[in-house]
Image: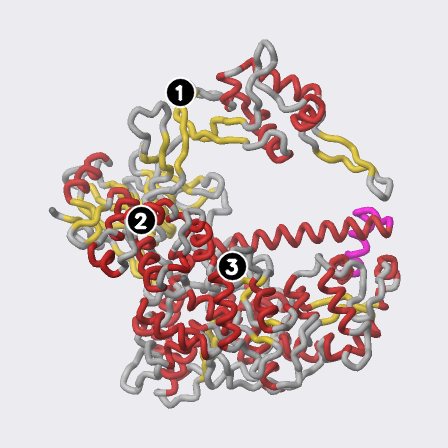
Amino acid sequence: MNFQVLVNDLNNLRVAGTEDGKLTKEHKEKILNYLKTTDKTVYMLRLIAKTVGIDTTQIKGYRIDKDNKPEFHSLAAYRRARKALKKEEIDLLDFPVAFLDDLGRILTLNTENGEIRKALNDPEFKAKYQFLNEDLIDKLIENKAAFNLSSNNKWHRFSLRTMKLLIPEMMVTSKEQMTILNDMGLLKQDERDYSNKDQIDIKILQDEIYNPVVRKSVKQTIKIFNVLWKKYNKEIAYVVVEMPREKNSADAKKRKEDNQKKYKKEKDESFESFRELTGLSEEGLENKINKFHQLSLMIRLWYQQEGRCPYSGKSIDPEDLLYKPALFQIDHIIPLSVSLDDGLNNKVLCYADMNQQKAKQTPYAFMQSDKGQGFEKLTAYVKNNNRLPGNKKRNLLNTDDLNDIETRKRFIARNLVDTRYASRVVLNELQAFINSKETNVKVSVIRGKLTHKLREKWNLEKSRETHYHHAVDASIIAVTPKLKLWKQAGYSLFPEKVEEQEINIGIGEIVSDKRFAELVYTLPFEETYLNQLRHLEPRIKFKHQVDKKMNRKVSDATIYATRMAQVGKDKRENRYFLGKIKDIYSLNGYIKFKKIYNKDKSKFLMYQKDPKTFNKLETILKGYPDSTELVQQSGKVKKVNVDPFEMYRQENGLIRKYSKRDNGPIIRSMKYYDSKVGNSIDITPNGAKNNVILQSINPWRTDVYYNYEKQDYEIMGIKYCDLRFYKGKYGITLEHYKEVKNKEGISRNAEFIFSLYRNDRIKVVDTGNNLSEEFLFGSRTNPSMKNYVELKPIDRKQYDTESVNVYGKVSNGRLIKKFSKREFKIYKVNTDELGNPFYLKKEANFPKDIIDK
């Protein structure tokens, strides 16, 4: 039931109304019992507040999701399964916890109904749980989807024995689960004796970190540290590490894109509202912002705050923002020297006199002395304002005492020193190693927030189109100990030790925002340092991660419908994927329809299979407009897009297929021939009329041979679907390898040179034209054309030039070419941990991972 994850969330909270600011054992038991027995929708923050008898604003320390909403584990899988089984007159509360644990294990390890039934019918299992009969087994299997026991959502995978030891201890203490495991001796985290060792043991360190993304990063970090220590240990004064976020890059990219869309939407809405109230045109507002750059931020804050100053409660006239900007200031809600947070969620627009009176206090402390509008009114205003982000609301209603040392340490933990479990493991391990060497080298693990802010203040633009920004970030991280802050304000970047509940670190005095910015953002070196960073590219070396693992997914997991069709300029029928416009009466649906229609209307199945109905749609397009004019509150006329199909529906009802009596089936969606099918796996059931496929057969590696007679290279691509698991190991059978080799046209007398995996580095030399270039290998591609590959640049995701050395023309950022010509010499490039290259003409006599049955 994943109790330990829920209890860990509860233990991380800080609450008002208890002696130590933590939930008691009784509180946790009451919350757990409610979750186990309720059939209602659960709002965890409200449940916790009700249990303790406090307001939700008096709860802190919980995780925040991408939408800035509180995120808790709430036994959701258990409650969902219980709700589903209650319809079958089965209540999970009637079963022992041990049975639910065993059932969870079986459903996690087995996905097929037959395998689940076999495991549940095991004689030993049925003897252990004698209430288990065939009827109950049938109902459990029928409702297996309700359990949704995906292991991808689990951060830590503990044994049942470990959890039985862990959960009771978590109920009576407020410690984090990993700290408890360490205290119980179940984690080998005691300082190791490195006095006779010259490097950190990577494997032992990895065993203490459960998140796979972080494990990989830690492995690379420690590898580089070991090499640098061996080479430069006498010259090293300090070590600063920035750990990665614990989400994968795809999640991070999506979150960033979502935030950018959200930011643009709010910005557009705030500007539009401001223009309507001031009568400014778009051009007029743009001119004002160009003259007074801070106006843009002021307008956005004004909009978020619904036109009110949060400290005084007074309205802010937009005309005053334009013509009397000196009346207002932008304030850090939590003083910058405490929060270290210069982000939008820690800023408000307020009257200048209010900002001067508030000074270096929180809004709560400021209003305790009968100043401003009063904290009660502020609380009501914040709760009723739906435009304020969740994090900003929490900052405005923060009641922490900034004069309290422990409170200030928590702010530092959150914004400067990285105190996540994995970071603590790395920091303390590095310190243990360095301390054993009797040196004065200091170590810290910092958050990326500081690096990001220094980049911004030092005007170092960050382009994610290339990989160089990682090296620039590392250079910034390396100079953070040289900032004035550590020398002049009493802060310390280097904690002696970081634990879950305690950071032994200097915290400094509370200073003005202006003074703090001066201490943090003043360059520690002369301007030449920035010039060096801006021209660092030629000196940067790369070591690329090459994935050689065999147990990856064979293809895109989506099942696609296909049809044979002759579309547009096709000279014969081809197999196409089927696409679908789900709702032709929505504006997005119409825009998609119009885009396909304008490009090639023969792509619609209806055009080819039912031309009379398609002609009916075209008649509607001619008879109804796709835009209209709306008069705004300001009196201005604005042109907006509309859906002709929806306008027809409003007048005549839903569109029907052509029939003589006009009573044909209703049309809601439309199918179209999307793109031609390439590499795929046909999974069409026997006897089915139309084909269904799995798309994108993923490539695993490419083996390179050399034909000495032809003086040219020959290649063969091996896909994940070619691999087998045989006698305890993955690989490709010798027999199948020979089949692929023959199919790809590798000559009998060709000699194996080396294998290339995705992101392997190669150097190609054109001896005839005296040209050379290095590339990252993508994959064998275009299987219908012999020896074609896709190559990528070493320093960026795709090409931004029209041509490259050796191969010539680039098409839409991609380089897909025939691998070699007679004059080419190709080298595989291996690198050491520091990116120094080694060039291989030949790697081995035989390819690896061939299974000879």
Residue flagged by tag 2: what amino acid is it?
Answer: Ile
Question: Residue 758: x, y in percent?
Answer: 34, 50
Between the residue at mark 2 and the residue at mark 3, the CA separation in whole angstroms equals 25 Å
Residue under pointer 2: 137
Residue under pointer 1: 573
The answer to which of marks 1 and 3 sits earlier in the sequence is: 3
**Of the numbered discs in the image, which one, if any, rests on residue 166?**
none
Magenta span: 279-293
Quadrant housing the N terminus: bottom left
Between the residue at mark 1 and the residue at mark 3, the CA separation in whole angstroms equals 58 Å
Between the residue at mark 2 and the residue at mark 1, the CA separation in whole angstroms equals 50 Å
- How many circles with numbers are drawn on the protein? 3
812 lies above or below 191: above
Residue flagged by tag 1: what amino acid is it?
Answer: Glu
> Badge 2 local density, few (<14 within 10 Å), some, or many (20+)?
some
509 lies above or below 81: below
* Residue 827 can be seen in this image: no
* Residue 243 can be seen in this image: yes
Q: Quadrant of residue 523?
A: bottom right
> Badge 3 local density, few (<14 within 10 Å), some, or many (20+)?
few
Question: Residue 443: x, y in percent?
Answer: 45, 81
Residue under pointer 3: 38
